[in-house]
Amino acid sequence: MPSRILALNPVGFPPGVRGKRLAPRLGTLEGKTVYLVDCRFDDSDIFLGQMQAWLAERMPGVRTVVKRIASVYLQDDPATWEEIQARGQAAILGVGH
Amino acid sequence: MTLETRYGVPTVAVHTDKFDRVVRSVAEVNGMPGLRQVFVPQPIMGRTPGELRAYVDGRDPVTGRPVMQEVVEGLTRPLEGDDGVALERATPRLVGPDTEDGLHRLFLENRWTDFLPIVLPTEERVAAMLAGTRRKPDEVVGRMRSTHFREPWSYTVEKVAANAVMAGARPEYFPVILALAATGVTARSSSSGAMAAMAVVNGPVRREIGMNAGTGAMGPYSHANATIGRAYSLLSQNGQGGSVPGLSYMGNQGNAYAYAGVTFAENEERSPWEPFHVSRGFRPDESAVSVFTGCQSTAFSLGLRERHWREHVGNLLRGMDPNTPPTLLLDPIAARQFVERGGFAAKDALLDWIHDAARMPAGEYWDYQLVQNYIYPRATFGEEPWASRLQAAPDAPIPMFRRQDIHVVVVGGETNGYWRIMGCNYQKTMPVDEWR
């Protein structure tokens, strides 16, 4: 019978992950301002333009603002997030890949 | 995630369906498995407005539900069980006991290998590897992650040793492998760009451990080159917690360079210029390893012809993607020809010339997809030199790269004057001697 041996596990050590709560949801989008945030990747601006058109046609009571992030998606953009927090009530981010 | 947690703004993220597993996984490891995410077909790139409107009007290919219904509900549906979930995970030190065949099967099933045969990292073999350094086995060497959005995992000297054993490396190589691990730069990026890493070793350690800087240096013709690169690659995928297609690896075509990276020693003795690590502030008698990432594109030529060498080099440079700068990998014959033809007695003079030669019309440059994705946003944000280049007329030739991103390394055995341009991003140079 073949002998049984031990081996070292080659996998690194994961950090602990703290649970984070989502923001409270809106009861309705009617009368609200929704930011469509363009992450500036692979023609996402054209896609969000189509989503904005859909909202204008189907949900005219929703105000939309298309906002491009200031730089590449790999960088934080606090000025944009603060604007959305101050002037909007919800956000749609796209398009991730 | 930032908008949700830090700014309290309800948010829906829209992704393409190919990234279903990876973005759900990223949400989970950020403590937000209930993140509201909606999927549309891949690709977005190159689709007409009408085609993208069809995506909006259509159904989420993952759930089968209407895309806009999911978007609206994602912003309005009350939270139910969407609270954050903490993750407590651990990595046991040992696996087994099992038969040798059973352990090989376990390593394959867990995707801890590169699917080539490995040496099982038994305690005895790992102990032998640890003899290659004075560092303690439980010392944390660094942290890695496959992408900006994932959580970094840490690894100890012993973990690096286990991966070095798996790769077939010898204890005398271990300081170089530890220095690579200490960079914290992954050789297993999850980028859809299917990138690989390149490692260049300089200084006395090259000879001490028998690294190849000459004929075949970048190929499978040196035990040290091959296994050091493979150890760095295995450590990257295991140290960061995985590199699994569709989950933590999204490189669309994969990359054969990634098996062992592009790992070699610089041919300092035959170079007309100072060694690469000296250019980064090290002394010639110090040993160091330099890491480059993003290796995908390679161009090559043979020598430099007297009449049109400038045009030929310019043509090669314009064949590279402008988002990934060039590192010239010159056989000593080609390096000397650059000195003879161009008068580049100093390395900086050559790099200045390359920077100036690599030009294309501004209109063409800004229309590259990767330039649109990664450089144009930075230009519009005012970051130089791109902000100024954005002002150029469409037909005005502008530099394709930043001067500081262009590098040159001498490698090869002078069997001929072939030379290459590797599109890659220099990351950092780490000292080897402190890991001995």
Image (spheres, rainbow, N blue to C red):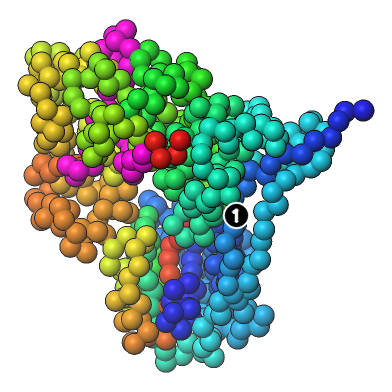
Give the quadrant of the C terminus of chain B. top left
Q: Confirm whether residue B347 shows in the render.
A: yes
Which residue range is magenta in the image? B402-431
B12 relative position to B405: left or right: right
Q: Residue sitting at 53 percent across and 86 percent down?
A: A25
Q: Is residue B338 above or below residue A66?
A: above
User: Looking at the picture, which amino acid does disc 1 mark?
Assistant: Phe
Residue position marked by numbered label 1 in the rendering: A13
Q: Residue sitting at 36 percent across and 19 percent down?
A: B213
Q: Residue furthest top?
A: B415
Q: Residue furthest right?
A: A1
The image position of residue B147, as x and y in percent, is: 46, 53
Work out whether residue B107 or residue B55 is closer to the camera in this orientation and state it: B107
- Does the stretch in magenta take in B403? yes
Q: Is residue B250 above or below residue B85?
A: above
B283 relative position to B294: left or right: left
Work out whether residue B346 or residue B302 is closer to the camera in this orientation and state it: B346
- Determine whether the residue tagged by mark 1 lies in a helix, strand or loop: loop
